[in-house]
Image (tube, rainbow, N blue to C red):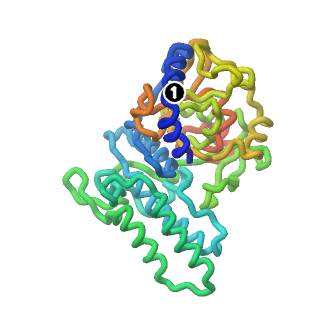
Amino acid sequence: MKYLIFFATLLFVPFLLTAQDDAEKQGYGFEVVKELPHTSVKNQGNSGTCWSYATTSYLESEILRLGKDTVDLSEMFYVYYAYIKKAEKYIMRHGLANFSQGGQAHDVMNIIRNRGMVPESAYAGKEYKGKYQSHDEVVTLMTAMLESLADLETKMELWPMALQSILDVYFGKTPAIFDWNGKAITPKSFQEEMGINPDDYVEFTSFTYYPYYQKVNLDIPDNWSDDLYYNVTLDELIEIIDYAIENGHTVCWDGDVSEEGFDHRSMIAVMPTKEAMKDDLFKYEISPEKEVSVESREAGFMSQKSTDDHLMHLVGTSKDAKGNKYYIIKNSWDESTNDFGGKLHMSLPYVKAKTIAYMVHKDAVPKHIKKKIGLK
């Protein structure tokens, strides 16, 4: 998750970022075409939990779409229980599983299905001085514990309680019941009141080495739970996004943000040509972008130039001064980190090249694609 690189950039090259920011605003001349309702940009801090922040933001928009009032959901509620499930899988696989801060959108849905959901007011998950935003220490402790346990031939049944005690110290105990609008309510009851049904949401990806129109186990480290994604063509991957936005649905996006053309501070993500990269990418004119094909996209993934290193929330579309299409992306690096309230404009070529997967409501999928994949 690209949080350390981002904050290092903010600290060490502010003069460059300011110059790029000014150039971008004058050269690209972005115009919002459609921006769907969403909540304010939050800050994941120095934690690798973008998956929870992005999916939580997405769910907050879903709640608005369903006609409910604005709500601030707890991101750390899902993180707490995800660590427990990751630990269980790590031990069951004798240490041969991924135990890290990363995750996917379905992790949130799986926890909601079993545990429900809570507002931020009921569980902030920041037990340490009320502002705990780095998970390095707690993950180091849990990893050391799990590695030691994995080496034991026989394990006592108490280790899950010990792990949960670590989480309780760093995050605080999760509530079994809490106050909501003057009444006592459980996480499952709150979920029902918000109208969120995890079974209404599906994930998509696009790679040729998987069979099209089938559910596939996407082979990426953060898919530690071995959840399944519908595999569609690249054109259909983009078509679903466009259909979703046109019909009032946002998208929970997962992809790569390591490209030189990704600049959060300048509010832009593009796929510049080699010629454009020789010059100042963010000069006072719109830079030409690469042609993205199925083959080039696949080559990027197979070479690990494209990885699932960041999840964000796609909330609309925009265009530049030449009419080129972009998608409005809500990040989780705080709303004060750029002049677009913590959001950015991601070009169509970038989305084609760097999307690893995404989650949408099943009603956001065109009927002819639903038919191909057998989705009802």
Residue closer to the observer: 243 or 253: 253
On screen, residue 22 above or below 357: above
On screen, residue 182 above or below 2: below
- Residue 132: percent from the left, percent from the top? 37, 55
Q: Is residue 53 left or right of residue 212?
A: left
Helix, strand or loop for disc 1: helix
Q: Is residue 344 left or right of residue 225?
A: left
Q: How many marks?
A: 1
Counting other residues with Cα less than 10 Å from the Cα at mark 1, is it few (<14), some (14-19), or many (20 or more)? Answer: some
Q: Using the rendered image of the protein, determine whether residue 233 is visible from the camera's viewpoint.
A: yes
Task: Determine the residue positioned at 38% across, 36% down.
Answer: 40
Q: Is residue 296 left or right of residue 112?
A: right
Q: Amino acid at mark 1?
A: Leu
Residue closer to the observer: 180 or 55: 55
Q: Which residue is tagged 1? A: 17
Residue closer to the observer: 56 or 191: 56
Q: Using the rendered image of the protein, determine whether residue 190 is visible from the camera's viewpoint.
A: no
- Residue 359: percent from the left, percent from the top? 56, 45
Residue closer to the observer: 96 or 229: 96
Task: Determine the residue positioned at 35% across, 56% down.
Answer: 126
Task: Determine the residue positioned at 52% across, 45% down.
Answer: 3
Q: Quadrant of residue 367?
A: top right
- Residue 170: percent from the left, percent from the top? 38, 63
- Residue 311: percent from the left, percent from the top? 55, 44
Q: Residue furthest left?
A: 182
